Amino acid sequence: MSDTVIEAAGLTKRYGEATAVNDISFAINRGEIFGLLGPNGAGKTTTILMMLGLTEVTAGTVRVMGYDPGREPLQVKRLVGYLPDTVGFYDHMTATDNLRYTAGLIGIPVAERAKRIMSSLDRVGLADVANMKVGTFSRGMRQRLGLAEILMKEAAIAILDEPTSGLDPHATSELLDMIRALKRDGVAVLLSSHLLERVQSICDRVALFHSGRIALLGTVPELARQVLGGGYTVEVEADGQGLAERLAALPGVRSVEQPSPGHFRLLAEGDMRPQAAAAVVGAGGQLRHLAVEVPSLDAIYNRYFQNQDAQHAA
Amino acid sequence: MRREGSPWRGLSAVLFRELFDNLTSARMLVLQLLVILFGGVVVYFAAEQIRNTTAEDPFLFLRLFAPPGQSLLSFVTVLSILIPLIAIGLGFDSVNGEYNRRTMSRILSQPIYRDALLLGKFLAGLATITICLITLWLMVIGFGLVRLGIPPSAEELTRCVIFLLVSIAYAGVWLSLAMLFSILFRSTATAALTSLGVWLFLALLWPALAQLIGEVISPSDIRFAQLGLPTPDTVAWQQGLARLSPGTLYGEAVLAMLSPEAQSLTNLLAQFQGRIMGAPLPVGQSILSAWPQMVSLIAGTILLYVAGYVVFQRQEVRA
């Protein structure tokens, strides 16, 4: 079996006149976390629904582990676990009962059900509330229960739609840890989000959506190099003679700004802190402060579309 | 394009969950109380009336359900109002409720077809109503045994069982109507109001409107009027239109089953067959005369269900 689990080619979805998803192509590999990122209404959820066979494809193809979601939806839905945007459960039923119902729909053998339900609840930290009604659950707990459902399903692919939206920072980091754990199990994770900053840390590769198209696709550092021409900002505060020239001469440094005397801002292709420190010390300067700013997806996104708009205006 | 796998996959899981849900819900408790309250009071009065007056009636047991000369407070009338109420009460939020709770996309991302979900919900609703009706039916029969002290004859029992089946078919029509609206409207309140509106219209206004429209389409002939007879064409139109309402169909079918001597349905046919006016029909003939009504009720159920099915299959999953 190949390493590609999901492959989309020229995928397009139109609602009447409006085009929700316009000719997108991408491939997702086994055991990677792939981020579909972009603002609300950019076509992320529509893309996900097409991959699950829950909405019809207008043009193009999509294959999930070699199956066509339009023709073989049951096969696809057996392999894929889906956590929808703001997932809902039956509030008057307990967490266990909710999962038991899903287990029945999936067709997990009766003898295995109880064990698989308990172990998946345990993994997401809901074991002690297993027999509480879901109506009493917080939003973060519901999202975790959704993840438990995917774990119980033993899915090869997990599709998570806006998993962190509406969660407080603590719940978010807990959830992201659980998603990383999924990856360690060899599950391919596809997650969508409009909060670029929050998910950038866990995504191996990202696709940036903009009005129905994939504008950019690749790892975050790749995109940073491509769009920002570097992306890493190294802040240096030091006293000394001719430091600006020394720093600018370092290989990998694109430019040096000097916002105030003794303060340098380097635009670099990587984390240049050791080289910068060496340069300052080598020039006999006194290093007072050194910091690096990893390129942010927000910055990449904004810069890219500023450039696009500028080109359109020209 | 042929789809792989069985459309019935997951049906039993959906069916049992929905059934369990229906039977344990507070809504069901309220409906059951309504049924027992109304049914109990009405049957009690019917039994008292029978004890006081009729002694030589061959169909004493049937009079429990449909006391002669009492149309307003008969058990049948109460049922013909309560059944739609229960069915709408169970069906109005069956599909849009899933969207509103945001469970729909999660359920549909499991390896089942939408067929299983919709059919499971429908069958669970129908099973719930059936359980309700059978309970009530057994209570009435038991009450009759105790109060009247005579067992029903085999013929009476047969008629009662068919009456029960017709009631279930009648419930099916309203259940699939309520489910259709729950598919069409995303708001449960809108779906409930529309279902109730359709029911009130068909139950209260339509019989009168059918008379009026029938008269307009085919005006009364002066020659018949002078003889003091209704014009056959007009009556045919009026009857045909009135039968668009499931309530009319149910009423006619029940009348045929529970009042063996009733003649309103097939007067002419009966006379051709050499029937003596006023003599009770045998069971087989009663079934035969109410057969079109029964089939129409079942057909109506299927038609409304299919309409809902088609809309549901094409519906977008995202809220």
Image: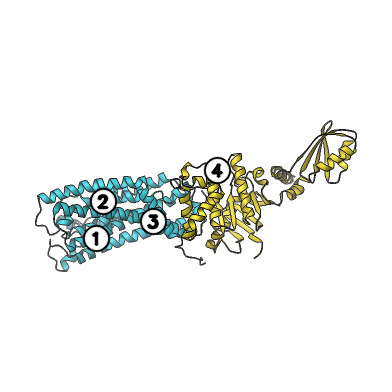
Chain colours: A yellow, B cyan
Q: Residue furthest bottom?
A: B273
For mark 3, does the 10 Å Cα neighbourhood hold few (<14), some (14 to 19), or many (20 or more) residues? many
In depth, the one of A225 and B300 nearer the eye is A225
* Mark 3 belongs to chain: B
Instruction: Give the image quarter of residue B219.
Output: bottom left
- Whole-angstrom CA distance, mark 3 to mark 1, is 22 Å
Mark 2 and mark 1 residues within 8 Å of each other at the beta carbon:
no
- Label ID, residue B204: none
Q: Label 2, secondary structure: give it.
A: helix
Q: Tell me which label, 2 or 3, sits earlier in the chain.
A: 2
Q: Identify the amino acid type marked 3.
A: Phe
Share a chain, discs 4 and 3?
no
* Mark 2 belongs to chain: B
Share a chain, discs 2 and 1?
yes
Residue under numbered circle 1: B161
Residue under numbered circle 2: B79
For mark 2, does the 10 Å Cα neighbourhood hold few (<14), some (14 to 19), or many (20 or more) residues? some
Q: Identify the amino acid type marked 4.
A: Gly
Q: Nearer the viewer, mark 2 or mark 1?
A: 1
- Whole-angstrom CA distance, mark 2 to mark 1, is 15 Å
* Mark 4 belongs to chain: A
Share a chain, discs 3 and 1?
yes
Residue under numbered circle 3: B122
Q: Label 4, secondary structure: give it.
A: helix
Q: Is residue B26 left or right of residue B283?
A: right
In depth, the one of A171 and B165 nearer the eye is A171
Q: Label 3, secondary structure: give it.
A: helix
